[in-house]
Amino acid sequence: MTDASTSPQGIDELLSWRLVVAGRLIRTMADTKIDTQAGGAPALGALLRLADHDDISQAELARRQRVEAPSMCRMIDRLERDGLVERTRDVTDKRIIKVRITDEGRNVAAAGREAVADLESGAFAALDTSERATLAELLGRLLDALPETGELHESNRAT
């Protein structure tokens, strides 16, 4: 016996498809709104995270941003080259590379935060405040339940 949640659906009814399309459209909006000085939306995300939680390891920053370590390394390379962040070795464990936002990085992050606020209000204009809060809560729970790499664990696979 199958229920509605496991029965075949048209692609337009699939939540995963809707999330992918909404994400792609919002990403396109972000790419047009976000100042390229920060290196685009992904790099701005890293700067905003550092503005809120500075001096964390490069590996931890990659985990929090849910990107692979090599991708984060390249992003930090560009941000460092542009003077927006600096890297240092951890004083207790020299294998750990810490990332710290610079004053210029904070300025770029502040301007980027304003652009993100504009993006959020435009992208989610169809939702009222309560619906936005519900969506944020639901997406937060979904992100918490998903593996960091996006791979399905055996226990999550349909049998």
Image: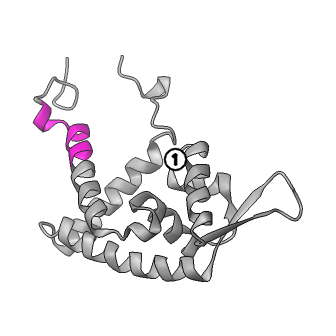
Residue 42 in magenta? no
133 or 19, which is in the foreground? Answer: 19
Residue denoted by label 1: 67
Above or below, 159 against 33 in this view is above
Residue 31 position in % (x across, y down):
30, 60
Residue 74 position in % (x across, y down):
58, 50
Residue type beneath disc 1:
Val
Segment colored magenta: 11-21
> Which quadrant, please, contains the C terminus?
top left
* Relative side of 100 to 104, left or right: right
Above or below, 150 against 22 in this view is above
In terms of secondary structure, what is the magenta stretch mainly?
helix
Above or below, 27 against 87 in this view is above
Residue 49 position in % (x across, y down):
53, 68
* Relative side of 45 to 128, left or right: right
Say which residue appears at 40% left-offset and 23% top-offset: 157
Residue 20 in magenta? yes
Say which residue appears at 34% left-offset and 68% top-offset: 34
Say which residue appears at 60% left-offset and 43% top-offset: 70
Residue 77 position in % (x across, y down):
61, 57
